[in-house]
Amino acid sequence: MTEMPLHEGGLAIGCRGQASVDSEAGEVFPNADCKSSCSLEEIARTLRRHIVTMIAAAGSGHPGGSLSAVEIVTVLFFRLMRHRSYDPNWKQRDHFILSKGHAAPLLYAALAESGYFPTKELITLRKIDSRLQGHTDRAMVPGVESTAGSLGQGLSFAIGVALACKLDSLDSRIYTLLGDGECDEGQIWEAAMAAPHYHLDNLTAIVDRNNQQIDGWTRDVMNTEPLGEKWHSFGWHVIEVDGHDIGQLLSAFEEAKQIKDKSSVIIAHTIKGKGVSFMENNLKFHGTAPTQEQLEIALRELA
Amino acid sequence: MPQEMSTRKAYGRALVELGEKNPDIVVLDADLSMSTMTHMFAQRFPHRFFDCGIAEQNMIGIAAGLAASGKIPFASTFAVFVPGRCFDQLRLSVAQSQLNVKIVATHGGITSGEDGFSHHAIEDLALICALPGFYVLVPTDAIETTQMVRTAAVTPAPFYIRLSRPSTPVIFDENYHFVLGKAVTLRQGNDAAIIAIGIMVSRALEAAKHLAQEGIECRVVSMPTIKPLDEEAILQSAKETGAIVTAEEHLKHGGLGSRVAQVVAQHYAIPMDFVAIEDTYARSGKAEELLQRYGLTAPAIEQAVKSAISRKQVHHS
Ligand SMILES: Cc1ncc(C[n+]2csc(CCOP(=O)(O)OP(=O)(O)O)c2C)c(N)n1
């Protein structure tokens, strides 16, 4: 049952793995230039190190919401998605549309590790002549599919891409990552109504349910509960998982793929700032860069 | 008063002061209260503060309903989200409804820096000035901000006040008196007039000082009310100096420059020049780097003044 989805590129740094068949997911994960096998957990840790390092170098940025979604992005880019770093606009690719654009460092780290651009470019984040803008710019960076930063717009964009894939008879899958605070936006719910209406079973939305936004806990700022029931009543297939559990994420994405005729949403329960003790559930690190000293502690924890 | 202070901080303080005096003052925010400084009001008057979450359009609608019921709502978020994201809500529920809603938007212009173009508000003045009935204000410093907020609270009309993120020089002293719709002449001169707003006012003063060393005497006028404009002050400057340069942290089209030009063009055929952002979006970078890159500096103003002066008609007798 080996399927087509292939990530063709190669881990640029950190861990390197040979082409390996993951029997559980039944998919090939070829890393031609990789020397030893490397687990998704290891990749996740590598991405976390990149995130804190690049944000510290920039002196500003959003660590909390980047760290919370690391496992989600890891399983997509390094296991499930069909994409080619050497051909970012490959017609048959699966699409990843980042809606919560402030998690740009996470996407940049995943793209660099997939070989879209050199990892050494990551530390240019937010600097004046860098391609790596504070929020993603699709015109500037290969592999970045959406220009983001104004919250609430990615799901609609993903619907457009999903409709186009259907029109072109492509079997590509479309993934979009939303914040739970972002779900305050009316446009999210306009889009939530539209996707099942168009029977977009090629679309999977992931809500990074870290329970925090900027002004506080989501339940205090604007209560979105019962979140799963809301999506369900809008016609979505709803799957709730521990968003840091790679096994649960893999089977959730697999389940989403099997659902026909409607869109799926994975509500991934996560911890903002996950992986760095002093950032976890700490509102301050929504949008504050670590100091050099804090970076050193963070890197030790992520070693 | 310190030498530097952000206008948003002055706003946060002014709201608390207003809240003490008037129980009808209510404040709304859209998950940015720490950045807009409305958290100060929220802490003091939690029952009169409404965090709408990340839902700006909803916030404007709610503010309109509160205003229709006699409250005086101040609604805040970043200037990229209001007016941009809520244009139709501002149009129908506020402007056409003639409601007493005060929008105070922070992080105007490109000095929000590293966040990149999604967070640079460079079209907001064009958008909001397009709406009939709105007062549109851009303070020069923290002192003027406080007075503007007080004025807005007691003037029953829709207001848009644009603030910025960084700390900026405090130019006025406590004796300064802001008058709605009136320009402020900060320096006299008859060779050219520089009309500036916001952070560009201190740069205009700097430019005028340099130009004076070269024997060019510039008038520097700040235009804290960009709608309605102080037409009298503009026409007087036009008549007495014969060359006008505008300076703003906004796109060249649709903001201060366009509006001043429209007034001038009706009365005088004099050269003008415009210091503003060309028809493009800026990148991520430090605030000061961006101001340099996009030409919002004192030297750029000096050059614009010289260019305008060089285009003055030579009078033949
Ligand atoms: C339309 C819009 N309004 C406000 C903001 C400012 N902002 C940036 S991130 C954020 C909070 C996001 O919370 P959430 O979606 O839960 O993201 P996470 O906690 O995962 O970082 C806000 C309000 C924005 N970027 N866009």
Image (tube, coloured by chain):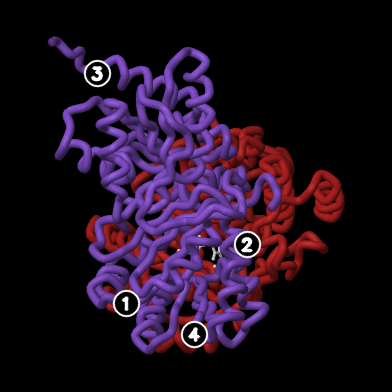
Q: Is residue B305 visible?
A: yes
The residue wearing badge 1 is: B99
Residues at marks 1 and 3 touching, judged by CB atoms closer than 8 Å: no
Task: Kindly identify which chain the residue marked by label 1 belongs to.
Answer: B
Question: Which numbered dot is residue B24?
Answer: 4
- Which element carries disc 3, helix, strand or loop? loop
Residue B233 image position (x, y, % from top left):
32, 43
Residue type, numbered disc 3: Lys
Q: Earlier in the sequence, mark 4 or mark 3?
A: 4
In the displayed structure image, the side of residue A177 where residue B245 appears, left or right:
left
Residue A177 image position (x, y, % from top left):
50, 64
Question: Which numbered dot is residue B57?
Answer: none
Residue at x 61% of width, y 46% of height:
B170
Q: Which chain is red?
A: A
The residue wearing badge 3 is: B312
Q: Residues within 10 Å of mark 3 (few under 14, many from 20)?
A: some
Residue at x 17% of width, y 32% of height:
B268
The foreground one among B304 and B193 is B193
Question: Which numbered dot is residue A65?
Answer: 2
Residue type, numbered disc 4: Asp
Residue at x 30% of width, y 73% of height:
B94
Residue at x 72% of width, y 45% of height:
A56
